[in-house]
Amino acid sequence: MAVLILAAVLAIGLGISVISVQQVKMLSETGYSVIAFYAAENGIERSLMATGTPPSIGTTTLTNGATYKVTVRLKSVSGCTADNYCVKSIGDYKKTQRALEIYY
């Protein structure tokens, strides 16, 4: 009887530890998501501040290791319904990606 009780307690303890490890991993990746989002936002801001129309296109690496890739579509090309052009920026940090798109 004691062995059965210990086995049940062990199974419950292992189940709780597996769930806890998964939660800790998910919380750390939430921070990566925020960094990726702000990298994408940085790409949008820099493309809007660039001179020329349409703004610059390309991939840039930031000092914290995050990257962003900016793509620009002109009006009426590939579904862009903006007055001038559409700018899409994809931020990437440790295999986490977030994207922003603006219509200008």
Image: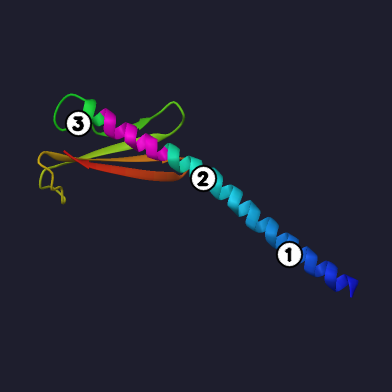
**Residue 8, image x, y percentages:** 78, 69
Location of residue 104 by image quarter: top left
Location of residue 2 by image quarter: bottom right
Disc 1 or disc 2, which is closer to the eye? 1
Whether residue 20 sits left or right of residue 44 in the image: it is right
Secondary structure mainly formed by the magenta segment:
helix
Q: Residue flagged by tag 3: what amino acid is it? A: Pro
Separation of residues labelled 1 and 2 (CA atoms) = 26 Å
Q: Residue flagged by tag 1: what amino acid is it? A: Ile
Disc number for residue 29:
2
Give the SS element for disc 1: helix
Question: The N terminus lies in which quarter of the figure?
Answer: bottom right
Which is more N-terminal, label 3 or label 2? Answer: 2
Give the SS element for disc 3: loop
Whether residue 84 sits left or right of residue 102 in the image: it is left
- Residue found 63% across the figure and 57% down from its top: 19
- Residue found 44% across the figure and 45% down from its top: 96
**Residue 33, image x, y percentages:** 45, 43
The residue identified by callout 1 is 12
The residue identified by callout 3 is 55
Disc 2 or disc 3, which is closer to the eye? 2
Task: In this rendered view, identify the residue nearer to me: 78 or 21.
Answer: 21
Separation of residues labelled 2 and 3 (CA atoms) = 31 Å
Which is more N-terminal, label 2 or label 1? Answer: 1
The magenta segment is 36-46
Task: In this rendered view, identify the residue nearer to me: 8 or 90.
Answer: 8
Separation of residues labelled 3 and 1 (CA atoms) = 57 Å
Which is more N-terminal, label 1 or label 3? Answer: 1
Q: How is the image coloured?
A: rainbow
